[in-house]
Image (cartoon, rainbow, N blue to C red):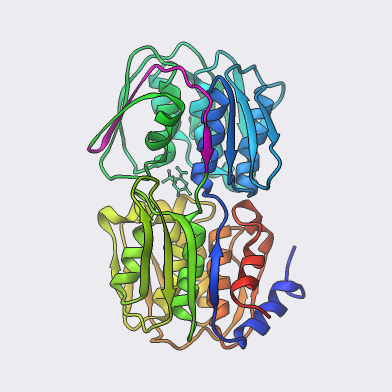
Amino acid sequence: MLLQAGRLVSSLTVKSNGGPLSGVLRVPGDKSISHRALLMAGLAHGTSRITGLSSGLDVVATRKALEAFGVAVEPAGAPGAWNVTGGSRSEPGGVIDVGNSGTSIRLLSGWAASLDALSVLVGDDSISRRPMGRVVEPLSAMGAKLDGRSHATLPPLVVRGGHLHGVDYEVPVPSAQVKGAVLLAGLSAEGATTVREALATRAHTEEMLPLWGADVTVEHRSVTVRPSRLDACAFHVPGDPSQAAFWVVAACVTPGSDVTVEKVYLGRGRAGFVDVLQRMGANVEVADYDPLSSVGDLHASYGPLRATTVGGDEVPSLIDEIPVLAVAAALASGTTTFADAGELRHKESDRVASTVGALRAVGFQAEGRPDGLVVEGSAGRPARGGTVDPAGDHRVAMSMAVAALAASGPVVIQGWECVQTSYPSFEEDMARCRPL
Ligand code: S3P
């Protein structure tokens, strides 16, 4: 589906002349947390009530996977509310299709590794190119039998699970998906399972597991899980910081804007983009932060931005926000470098190539590097407009919609339907803070 002649072009044409963004928004439930809530509830005895669940296709894929394993997942009245009755899983009758969702396939490989059954996990073309050796290696070390294309490094993945034993595993690439897969498998392994990471990644698995009753210990950069029985609980998914980042950057780069995004998860490993924007001189503040839930409001308003360097330890905490931070960098003064981010090349697209291509397509200057990108700031001169191919990557597509809001000419974003994977209500939220 191309939206050249569709809503997005015309609405962006209007919006690029439509003035500032303003208002108070709530973004959908966090995608990473939504996947984990479903998977944990699926292992737990009794019925867990989950509210605020993301409605994106990635999370739908995990929900459907649970159903294929015999877990009952039923709508519970309000939008985003689901009852999940877990505790007993059965061998799926067919293949599990995760669509475009890397988090689904990697977390499910660990979730399925503890079940004495055969599970076959497949996905779309993008998934079929994404590296899986990183989950195959530790899960095999735990005693599961995994195979896949290209010597068990690419999907489809075949998992023959059961009879696991604990391991002490140092994750070679910073990846919360790998950490999560190993910890989920470790819940039913014999003995303790420890995951060590050189760089801290998002902490959702270790933060959430104890809520379902798992025995988890966190020490600096290592997490240990011991065999545990999970029991149902009530869980609310907070707002997604990755989605909030689009409106925060949009407010920072669109003259006259002032936007608040309420009730966003800003815990360990997710809020790095706020620090980067503040370093760039942006007017971004956290308000009403609750340290118990790690939830707070983000308030952002327009102002001039200056270039910065992004790299090192902070990269895992903002890896998904690099495309939209690159839009901020393109409107800043000076040259911004994103380094130590080679993982970008293994996301839904090669995000170095797709982000650089998209920025150039609307008139900005950017160049790819093996481990990131360099963006030449325009010192506030808006994108001139153009046609963008986000390579089927939802985050690149939405980042370019943000650039379009501050553009001087129309921006056409091809293949806009990819946004359904994580943020189906993006256009509604755009209209909310920038009424036509
Ligand atoms: C995620 C971890 C990150 C992130 C992805 C979601 C998760 O991937 O990019 O969007 O939910 O654990 P990696 O584990 O590959 O770093």
Q: Image point 35% across, 80% down: which residue?
A: 305
Task: Please indicate whether residue 227 sits to the left or right of residue 65 in the image.
Answer: left
The quadrant where residue 208 appears: top left
Please indicate, yes or no, whether residue 361 appears anywhere in the rendered image. Answer: no
Q: Which residue: 46% across, 50% down?
A: 346
Q: Residue 187, how many percent across, how many down?
A: 42, 21
Q: Position of residue 182 (x, y in %)?
A: 41, 28
Residue for point 50% across, 49% down = 238
Q: Nearer the viewer, residue 174 or 201?
A: 201
- Depth check, front residue: 293 or 382: 293
Q: Give the range drawn in magenta.
A: 220-236
The image shows residue 88, relative to residue 261, as above or below, that is above
Residue 318 in the image, given as x and y percentages of width and height: 38, 57
Residue 245 vs residue 372: left or right?
A: right
Q: Residue 223 is drawn in which quadrant?
A: top left
What's the residue at 64%, 32% (across, down)? 83
Quarter occupied by the N terminus: bottom right
**Is-magenta flag for residue 181?**
no
Q: In this rendering, does residue 391 appear at all?
A: yes
Number of marks in the rendered image:
0
Q: Is residue 172 above or below residue 240?
A: above
